[in-house]
Image (spheres, rainbow, N blue to C red):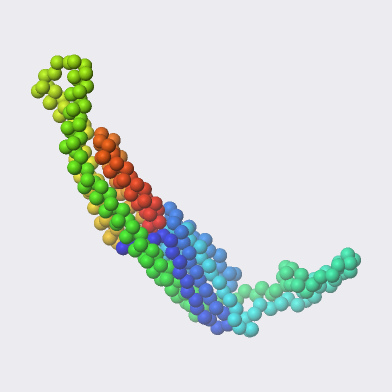
Amino acid sequence: MIRSMTGFGKAVAQLPGKKLTIEIKSLNSKGLDLNMRLPSSHREMEVEIRDQLANGVLRGKTDIGFFVELTGADDAQAINSEVVKGYVRQLNTIARELGLESDLLSLAMRMPDAMKGEAKELLDEEKEVVRNTVAEALKSFNEFRLREGAHLEDDLTNNIQTIRDLLAEVPKYEEERVVNTRERIRKALEALEAKVDESRFEQELIFYLEKYDVNEEKVRLAGHLDHFLESLDAEGVHGRKLGFISQEIGREINTLGSKANHVEMQKLVVGMKEELEKIKEQVLNVL
């Protein structure tokens, strides 16, 4: 079963004094593009988390939200009181000189080093919780991709079946095409009042019609349609392979159109091209 490149997954874990939330969102992309910023408290795990995500996401433009919310008073970040007092005194002096009134404490708290930044090394237990939460978010994310992939697979299967149905209509016009071609050439010769050797005429007509024979194109196109459906059921990453098969389908449809030489057959070819364009758009979102 195929998976969509579009996905969303979320996992939440509760730690002593803090809440950890991880969100994964992705859109289609030619390769893997991970966009993640960790809080300073978990920066030491960045390489490990990136590797874990890369192995689970595989492809797509992916944004990772990594949020740590403190829930315990003991874990609240300490205020650097002496620095804040110094800021307030300086701001108070400037305010008096300019005749301004303002919330000096609020301004002071926004100044550099107002909060004590004491880096704490992560405990092994917390690191394991982070790994498990990332894994849980990836599981949710890939389940979403599978659900979206099922919808994509239904659409692609229907598109392929429509092309197959249109291809099945081609033979009904082939005999008519031969008759029309014969009559058109004969009328052209009659207009020239040329003397025609019937056996030579039939021979040349056969050579001419061979150039417009579409049996090979029909067989190859049917084979590519089968290959496309087989690839949908295969294991692994499908997007690029389905893209290549779509190109081969398009090549046979174009050749069929160039050889059609018949209005109704050209209409069938146009219908096939419309379905193929839908397939190409959908395949861009297949993992």
Q: Residue at x 27, y 37 (%)?
A: 263
Give the residue furthest to the left.
199
Q: In which quadrant of the rendered image does the N terminus lie?
A: bottom left
Can residue 248 be seen here? The reply is no
Is residue 106 shown left or right of residue 163? right
| Residue 151 on image: x %, y % | 35, 62
Q: In which quadrant of the rendered image does the C terminus lie?
A: bottom left
Q: Is residue 226 above or below residue 71?
A: above
Q: Which of 22 and 144 lies nearest the eye of the viewer?
A: 144
| Residue 66 on image: x %, y % | 54, 69
| Residue 11 on image: x %, y % | 47, 74
Q: Residue at x 18, y 36 (%)?
A: 176
Can residue 103 be seen here? The reply is yes
Q: Which of 286 and 32 lies nearest the eye of the viewer?
A: 286
Q: Residue at x 49, y 80 (%)?
A: 125
Q: Which of 185 and 214 lies nearest the eye of the viewer?
A: 185
Is residue 225 shown left or right of residue 135? left
Q: Is residue 273 above or below residue 127?
A: above
| Residue 32 on image: x %, y % | 45, 57
Q: Residue at x 26, y 53 (%)?
A: 161
